Structure formats: structure tokens, C-alpha cells
Amino acid sequence: MQRRLLFALGLCLLISRTQAQLIGGEEDEEEEEEEEEEEESIEDETPEEKLQRKNIKQDSNLSVDKLIAKYGYQAEVHHVTTDDGYILTMHRIRNSGAQPFLLQHGLVDSSAGFVVMGPNVSLAYLLADHNYDVWLGNARGNRYSRNHTTLDPDASKFWDFSWHEIGMYDLPAMIDHVLKVTGYKKLQYAGHSQGCTAFFVMCSMRPAYNEKIISMQAMAPAVYAKETEDHPYIRAMSLYFNSLVGSSITEMFNGEFRFLCRMTEETERLCIEAVFGIVGRNWNEFNRKMFPVVLGHYPAGVAAKQVKHFIQIIKTGRFAPYSYSSNKNMVLYREHVPPRYNLSLVTVPTFVYYSSNDLLCHPHDVEAMCEDLGNVTGKYLVPLKEFNHMDFLWAVDVRKLLYNRMLQVLGKQPQAKDIEGEAKGLRIRGRAIGQNAAR
């Protein structure tokens, strides 16, 4: 598994340097191959299977606003400019007059993460159905927020940011925009992974924003990461950044998997295994038919500095701002090492959701984080042992396993369900399906 992971990662890193040239010369050939494969497979399809295949192909290519509109929801696109000049795109599932709810994605993700699996699965649609005015953020540098008032996205200076700046500038700008447009004084917030990281940066460094949030639903919070140090992906990335090529790279993961994983059925399976190697293995809850849709939206692009910053907190065991040289740290922070973020200043009522099989957010780290946060109202360990880091968004049964609990916390589902019992049933039912998919 580790060899496969490193092989796929190595290919992706090489492709990231030459992707534009390769794709430019191969697009026509790739389209012809896809058409040939489709012709071979459509003969035995039922009408329902044909419709599903058509929807999967459409959904993999539609932008988030068009994807929302396709499924009958009122979609809007908003643009927000941060104090340091980054122009961000926000997507909205409009429900005029309803309580605004901001969803913020994780690393290499975009607003698509909360809609990509469709109305029967994804969180954004579920919240819209429960009478929320849903807003989807896009952090600087992803495919929807590659713009600036003065900086060129093709220049290295544009990419000189980490998730620290996302917390300091992006989230405040988006929150202020949502409140201004809707007329509300406070909003609900949910984050996945880096969407939690940046939120806790904001609330600790700009504590006035605690007063603008009703509650925080923190899913797989990538904050403390001491237990992640031995992760093979982290070690591979650390070695890469210490290499001659890696030390100079500024932008990463902007569509490499889409190019690589569509080459053959074997490369698709290899990519799925590579993803599992990073986030945790769970074939039972993975919808392989939807993988082309996932590839159409992931990865969405990040600054290399974001990844480097995560590696720093993993290696040091300290949740702190980006560390430069000792001299530069003295200039910026007046200390040789950056001071830790003070999580006790995060006074927003925070409910934390985590899982046992999350290779990027170990339960011990999440529980340690909860001890330091200023106002944890509860925590929920997903009762399916195989539940991984991306199952918070992609799992077939994520509504039963996770979102129903969130609705209870939000007061939208007063009758408690036997979620743990459901999880046991799903685990038994899905075992054979997962084993077959793995083959």
C-alpha cells in the first residue's frame, strides 16, 4: 500500500510541473478514448443506468453554481475581496429570509465538497432542505478563487500564503459579506478539516468574530496533529519539499488526479487506493460510480505553503503560525519560534465530530484539542470504525452516520435516532459490497 501511495504521489508531483503541456496535447485523444469506452459499455445498460451515466458525466464537468441549479435549487455566485486583495468566489443556495449557514472546505477542496455527491447525500442540500440559507466558501488559491486586485496568479507572490491568512482574511471577509447581504447579525458555521483550522485561527487571532457565529460544527478538525507524524504521505511530502524541485514549488494539486486517474481502469483503482492510503480505507462507504464526479472537482488547488504549514504543526506538535528562519521569526513574532494559537480565546459554542479511521486527524489529537478550546459543547465519535477523513463528505450513508446527529445539535431534528444501531447494520450490509469493489 505504501509503495502504491508513493508511486501515485510521485506521478502527481511530476505531472504538476508539466500538466498544462501534457493536457493540451492529449485532450482530443482522451476524449476519443472515452467515447470508445462508452460505446462498448452502453449496449447492455438499462434506461436507469444510462441516465445515471449521463448525470455522472455532467456533474463531473459542471461548476458548483450550475450543479446546484441542475438539481432544482436557487443558485447564486458572489465575489468577495479580502483586506489583502484576494478575490474570493462564494456559492449560495439561496433561501431568502432564512438563517444563513456558512460551509468551509478543507485542503485541496472547494465549495464543491459540500454538493458533489448530490441532493441525497451532500450536506449543503440537506441544510437547504431544513430551511437554511446556505453559503459555500472558497479559500484563496483554489479554482474558484484564483484572482487578486493586483497580483498575478501565475506569479509566485500570489501563492505566498497559508491557512493562517485564510483564517485572518478570507473567513472574516466572507462572514461579513454574508451578514451584510442577509441582514443577520450572526450565522451558523460548519467546517471540514482545514475549514476548522482556519476558523480557529480566526477566532483566536481576531476574537471579535466569535460574536458573529451562533455555533461551530467542526468535522474532522485538522488542528492538533502529533499522532500524524508517521503517516507515509506526510513523510513523502516532507522529503519532496526538502528536494531541489520541491523547495521552489508554489502551487500544488490543481487537477493532477483528474489527468492521471482517468488514464485506465487500473490507474483509477490505484488512485482510489492512494486516496485511502492518505485518508483511511473504507470501501464499504465509498461510491465508486461517483469517482468520476469526484475527479471532476478534486483536487481544486492549494498553495504549497499551506501543505508545508500543516507539516510544520505535525513535526513540531505545536498549533502555531508559519515558522520561517529564526531571525525572520524574531521580526514577525518577537520569538525564535512562533507562539501557539490560544484556543481558549475560541468562545464560539463548538461541537466536534471525529472518527476512528481518520489517518489525518487522530482521535487522540482531536480530544486534546477539545481540552484546549474555549467552549466545546459536545463531541461525537462516528460509530462506524471504518469512517475516514473524506467520509465526512463522501460516505454513502453519511446522513445516517453523521448529519442526523448534526441536525440534532442544531435543533432541527428533535427525535434522537439510534445512529449507533444503524452504523452496525450498515457495517454488516456493506462488508461484501466493499470487498467486491476492492477487487
Image (cartoon, helix red, strand yellow):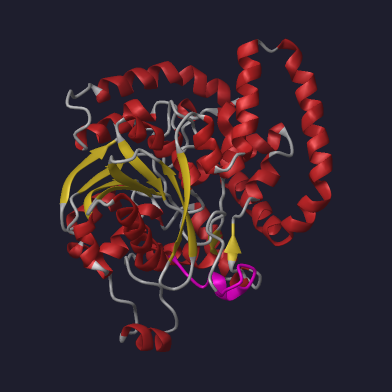
Q: Position of residue 232 (x, y in %)?
A: 51, 53
Labels in figure, total? 0
Q: Position of residue 93 (x, y in %)?
A: 41, 40
Q: Residue at x 70, y 32 (%)?
A: 265
Q: Residue at x 45, y 67 (%)?
A: 162
The N terminus appears in which quarter of the rendering? top right
- Taking the image as shown, residue 375 lies to the left or right of residue 42, namely left
Residue 116 visible in rendering: no
Q: Is residue 152 magenta?
A: yes
Residue 203 versus residue 267 in the image, above or below:
below
The image quadrant of residue 241 is bottom right
Magenta span of residues: 150-162
The image quadrant of residue 95 is top left
Frontmost residue, 370 versus 145: 145
Q: Residue at x 44, y 40 (%)?
A: 114
Q: Is residue 399 magenta?
A: no
Frontmost residue, 382 versus 127: 127
Q: Position of residue 230 (x, y in %)?
A: 44, 55
Frontmost residue, 185 versus 136: 185
- Taking the image as shown, residue 287 lies to the left or right of residue 292, namely left
- Taking the image as shown, residue 346 lies to the left or right of residue 174, namely left
Q: Main secondary structure of the magenta part?
A: loop
Q: Residue at x 60, y 21 (%)?
A: 52
Residue 333 visible in rendering: yes
Residue 305 versus residue 231 in the image, above or below:
below
Residue 60 versus residue 308 in the image, above or below:
above
The C terminus appears in which quarter of the rendering? top right
Q: Position of residue 244 (x, y in %)?
A: 65, 73
